[in-house]
């Protein structure tokens, strides 16, 4: 087999041109997200196969082809099909819709109206992605290429100019100039803390040591966040290119990519990307003939949130337990194997090629005074349009939740937005106009974190939210240091008690005492921030704690021990839906006879509440008040069923 | 006690599998976690005999092997069922009532979280975020993701699992 | 090379590279510890030896066993903040270490000195008391000094445990090095030298720890 090796900047440029010119401008591209577990879970693989089959059957192989891509962002509406060059955007596509798309759109360029996105508020249909509010407010500079490339094909990336920034850095810039450009860009680490990337690089570069390492942190453990997974799955070469540029600037010749165990597809795509880059000589010795050498290994995690902490991650790569170690000497000076090490997260590395290509001035034109560029958020929870969004820093929470996210489902009221995962906190409704950047979120007691943004509505209990994060950390902390381990254990017990109506006077003060010691004395950042969810919910929703403790009432009617389910006899039409769906057969009644719940058998799974048709709304959640007597056996329905 | 049972039954097989896994990383001690991940995939859990083999072949104290095997969630020190059910407990799933989904699955299968059914068919686990947050609540059954399944959907999947 | 620093108002000259704890002890200033041992690598996990330091005008809390001395550093080994940390830590550790509601040894002394209410969290503690505070002195001594690797950590988070590996513990009968290290007295009072009933790896795997 002939060598694929690209041995100069010129050859890379030529290859890019060849790939671009080979693409037939009249050929339609059917872009489907199959390289992401979200798309896969909704059956996008079957859609892609069906397209291939129908294109063949219609004899359109010369006119259309399927492109399997990574995450395109609008995960709520998966499977999504985008047709280029028009950019027609079809949502919730079923395999049986495929023949119609092929005959209408692919052969004739006509729209299939019924598959377009319909705005839930205005009822208007949007033909193209840019017409959909979810996308029109975004600025997808890092994430935007996902839909245009198959992550398993390096040529797709090179065809879009990929590795051009690396070539520019290697041949037109000295390592100092690269470093300077990144410093001037004011890029801050996207993994959580927001430390200036250029400064981290500089410290590593200046630290003494023959061997230096660069690391990619793809141990995205924050529950509710999946940006890094989607970049690693959907555009791994952008991360590799950033890593190579960083290594060149720092003077490192070896890198590691640490991928979380729960992300098997990201791991596979990374392995494939490294292999293809090696075949092209973009990783290895004498890259592009520049004399710069670099090799990279991919390391699988094994399931531990705390492994994302820098020293823990380094321990894990060394084959030791992924526990944090004392960090009085910075890892930039003494990190992996005791050598100067620069660890950045996936999104940070993916920003680097953009900065080199377009310059720090351009990068500085986006964002706020203290936080430049864009940030990808996973907008999830109780919001209509869930998915991944990339916006300039400084956008307000309100714009994010309402303009992009389309507001709260079922007309519910927003209560809070949780940011920063277990290290972050909740931001209540009154701060929705806060511009999102590193410093503003910290001021509110929360933090940017890696970009999880979980929207909570009036049905979410804030004490339960704190309990949830504390329990998460009880399992996910390493358990080495006593303030974190014993503090979390006791916070968990206290919060469990409060959620079960067994809270006591003095509990709130105990939570605050424990939190203070955890903040002041824990060994690593996990312990130091683990009490934040409890502290911020206390700060903004103290009344909810007090309702639980003093009245045994859960205002959100979410805490299972304080909530009962009741079927209102006046509203029940005896439609049997709840009875059929109850997993414990706790609901009695038959056609024409009002249903009732046997409280002994009820496991409070909420199923009856959810399946009761909204036009009846007969199932009620009750908390903090006595449960009404059940109807006498055989009570007949009084309410008429109106279709 | 535990040592002797595995010695009589599984050791020859364990030894071969361990040799292969250890060999594929060039007997590098730093690859301990990677070796254990491979062996977890082969056996579905990490039997004591396998851990002791790894300790011998990689020349790492058995204490260290156990420490790692018991630290990470990807490893199991107990046998697991033929079908693995993972209910996502990530925040996005949590606010969309994944604890209630877990209750439902528990009730349908008549088993508690972290248990393996007596017939060895199912193991019910929770996982702290599958990263599939826009689809919540999510349950992965043998690595196939189901987004907000109904009781009937679940029953159908469980019935079809041998 | 030596550096000059101030500990509790006292001017101290210390060798560069040594820890604050070592410098304080040389100067006759006591800082309490639970996981520190002179023959072992600093572990920095009990956090009892936390102190406040001021360097270049910045105040922070560090553990004195892991943080090196610096020129011009100002160290406070006691302050309202430090006393609060130690008091709450003792209160949090008390329920797992108490025998019949009473603390023993080093823990008892510390509780008295810092005015800790050792019953504060008692009613809320629902796990089985292990009488182990996971200081890891036994684990590390057996690893780093004795070289037998007979004790190790298992699990993580609140379920972290230190357990014996009976098959590796042949030398324990004669060694007994960890007996005097244990700050709660668990090892000398509970061991049987053979199967380590109640804290062996088999107990852990059987879910009995």
Image (spheres, grey):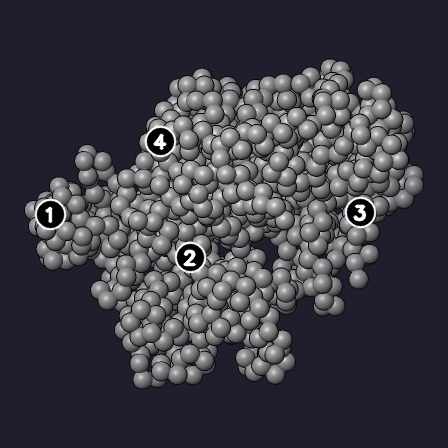
Marks 2 and 1 close (CB-CB < 8 Å): no
Task: Specify the subunit that label 4 lies on.
Answer: A
Labelled pair 3, 2 in contact (Cβ < 8 Å): no
Q: Are marks 4 and 1 on the same chain?
A: no
| Disc 1 secondary structure class | strand
Q: Which mark is residue C3?
A: 1
Work out whether residue C106 or residue B4 is closer to the camera in this orientation and state it.
Answer: B4
Residue identifier under label 3: B153
Q: Is residue A4 left or right of residue A248?
A: right
- Among the two numbered marks 4 and 2 on one chain, the one whose residue lies closer to the N terminus: 4
Q: Residue at image x 82%, y 56%? A: B160
User: Which residue is disc 4 drawn over?
Assistant: A174
Q: Which mark is residue A318?
A: 2
Of circles 4 and 2, the one toward us is 4
For the residues beneath circles 2 and 1, the answer to whether they share a chain is: no
Q: How far apart are the alpha carbons under marks 4 and 3?
A: 59 Å
At which x and y percent is residue C112? 25, 58
For disc 4, the neighbor class at 10 Å (few under 14, some 14 to 19, many from 20) is some
SS at badge 2: loop
> Residue A198's x, y, as percent?
36, 32
Residue farthest along the front direction in this orientation: A2
| Badge nearest the viewer, 3 or 2 | 2
Quadrant of residue A202 within the rendered picture:
top left
* Few, some or many residues within 10 Å of mark 2 (<14, 14–19, 20+): some
Q: Which chain does tag 1 point to?
A: C
Name the residue rendered at 57%, 25% in the picture: A140
């Amino acid at each position: 087999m002939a060598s694929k090796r690209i041995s100069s900047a010129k050859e890379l440029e030529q290859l890019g041109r060849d790939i671009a010119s080979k693409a037939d401008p009249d050929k339609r591209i059917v872009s489907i997200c199959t390289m992401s577990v979200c798309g896969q879970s909704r059956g996008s693989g079957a859609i892609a196969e069906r397209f291939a089959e129908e294109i063949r059957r219609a004899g359109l192989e010369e006119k259309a082809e399927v492109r399997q891509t990574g995450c395109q962002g609008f995960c709520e509406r998966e499977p999504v099909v985008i047709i280029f060059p028009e950019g027609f955007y079809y949502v919730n596509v079923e395999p049986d819709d495929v023949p119609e798309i092929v005959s209408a759109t692919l052969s004739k360029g006509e729209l299939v109206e019924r598959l377009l996105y319909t705005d839930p508020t205005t009822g208007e249909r949007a033909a193209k992605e840019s017409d959909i509010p979810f996308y029109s407010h975004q600025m997808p500079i890092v994430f935007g290429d996902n839909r245009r490339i198959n992550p398993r094909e390096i040529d797709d990336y090179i065809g879009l100019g990929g590795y051009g920034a690396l070539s520019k850095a290697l041949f037109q810039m000295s390592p100092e100039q690269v470093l300077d450009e990144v410093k001037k860009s004011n890029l801050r680490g996207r993994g959580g803390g927001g430390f200036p990337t250029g400064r981290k690089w500089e410290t590593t570069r200046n630290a003494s040591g023959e061997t230096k390492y660069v690391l990619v942190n793809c141990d995205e453990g924050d529950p509710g966040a999946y940006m890094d997974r989607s970049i690693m799955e959907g555009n791994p070469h952008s991360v590799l290119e950033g890593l190579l540029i960083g290594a060149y600037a720092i003077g490192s010749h070896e890198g590691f990519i640490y991928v979380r165990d729960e992300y098997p597809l990201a791991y596979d795509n990374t392995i494939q990307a490294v292999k293809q880059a090696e075949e092209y000589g973009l990783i290895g010795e004498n890259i592009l003939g520049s004399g710069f050498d670099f090799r990279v290994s991919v390391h699988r995690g094994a399931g531990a949130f705390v492994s994302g902490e820098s020293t823990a991650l380094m321990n894990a790569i060394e084959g030791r337990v992924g526990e944090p170690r004392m960090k009085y000497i910075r890892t930039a000076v003494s990190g992996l194997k005791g050598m100067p090490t620069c660890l950045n997260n996936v999104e940070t590395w993916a920003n680097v090629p953009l900065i080199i290509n377009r310059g720090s001035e351009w990068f500085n034109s986006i964002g706020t005074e203290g936080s430049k560029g864009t940030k990808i958020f996973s907008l999830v929870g109780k919001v209509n349009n869930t998915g991944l969004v990339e916006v300039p820093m400084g956008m307000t929470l309100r714009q994010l939740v309402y303009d992009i996210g389309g507001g709260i489902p079922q007309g519910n009221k927003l209560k809070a937005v949780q940011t920063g995962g277990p290290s972050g906190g909740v931001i209540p409704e009154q701060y929705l106009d806060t511009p999102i950047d590193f410093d503003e979120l910290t001021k509110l007691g929360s933090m940017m974190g890696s970009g999880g943004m979980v929207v909570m509505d009036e049905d979410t209990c804030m004490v339960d939210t704190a309990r949830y994060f504390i329990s998460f950390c009880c399992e996910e902390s390493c358990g080495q240091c006593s303030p974190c381990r014993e503090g979390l254990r006791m916070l968990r017990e206290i919060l469990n008690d409060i959620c079960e109506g067994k809270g006591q006077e003095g509990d709130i003060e105990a939570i605050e005492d424990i939190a203070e010691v955890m903040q002041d004395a824990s060994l690593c950042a996990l312990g130091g921030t683990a009490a934040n969810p409890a502290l911020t919910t206390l700060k903004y929703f103290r009344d909810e704690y007090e309702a639980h403790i003093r009245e045994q009432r859960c205002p959100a009617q979410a805490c299972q021990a304080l909530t009962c389910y009741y079927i209102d006899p006046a509203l029940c039409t005896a439609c049997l839906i709840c009875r059929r769906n109850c997993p414990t057969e706790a609901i009695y009644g038959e056609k024409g006879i009002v249903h009732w719940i046997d409280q002994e058998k009820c496991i409070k799974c909420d199923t009856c509440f959810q399946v009761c048709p909204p036009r009846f709304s007969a199932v009620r959640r009750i908390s903090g008040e006595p449960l009404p007597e059940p109807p006498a056996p055989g009570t007949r329905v009084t309410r008429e069923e109106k279709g | 006690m535990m040592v002797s049972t595995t010695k009589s039954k599984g050791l020859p097989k364990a030894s071969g599998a361990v040799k292969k896994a250890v060999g594929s990383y060039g007997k590098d001690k730093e690859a301990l976690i990677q070796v254990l991940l491979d062996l977890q995939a082969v056996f579905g859990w990490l039997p004591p005999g396998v851990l002791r083999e790894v300790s011998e072949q990689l020349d790492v104290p058995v204490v260290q092997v156990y420490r790692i095997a018991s630290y990470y969630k990807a490893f199991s020190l107990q046998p697991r069922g033929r079908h693995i059910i993972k209910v996502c407990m990530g925040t996005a799933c949590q606010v969309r009532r994944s604890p209630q989904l877990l209750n439902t699955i528990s009730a349908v299968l008549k088993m508690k979280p972290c248990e393996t059914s007596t017939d060895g068919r199912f193991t019910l686990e929770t996982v702290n975020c599958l990263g599939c947050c826009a689809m919540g609540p999510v349950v992965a059954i043998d690595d196939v993701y189901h987004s907000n399944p109904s009781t009937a959907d679940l029953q159908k999947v469980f019935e079809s699992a041998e | 090379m030596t550096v000059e620093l101030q500990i509790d108002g006292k001017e101290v000259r210390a060798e560069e590279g040594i820890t604050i704890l070592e410098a304080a002890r040389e100067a006759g200033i006591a800082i309490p510890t639970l996981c520190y041992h002179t023959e072992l690598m600093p572990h920095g996990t009990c956090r009892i030896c936390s102190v406040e330091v001021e360097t270049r005008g910045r105040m922070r809390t560090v553990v004195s066993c892991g943080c090196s001395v610096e020129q011009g550093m100002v160290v406070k080994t006691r302050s309202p903040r430090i006393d609060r940390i130690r008091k709450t830590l003792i209160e949090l550790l008390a329920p797992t270490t108490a025998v019949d509601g009473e603390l023993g040894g080093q823990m008892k002394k510390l509780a008295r000195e810092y005015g800790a209410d050792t019953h504060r969290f008692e009613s809320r503690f629902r796990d089985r008391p292990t009488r182990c505070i996971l200081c890891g002195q036994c684990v590390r001594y057996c690893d780093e000094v004795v070289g037998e690797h007979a004790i190790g950590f298992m699990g993580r988070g609140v379920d972290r445990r230190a357990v014996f590996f009976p098959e590796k513990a042949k030398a324990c009968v004669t060694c007994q090095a960890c007996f005097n290290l244990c700050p709660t007295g668990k090892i000398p009072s509970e061991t049987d030298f053979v199967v380590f009933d109640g804290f062996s790896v088999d107990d852990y795997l059987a879910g009995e720890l």
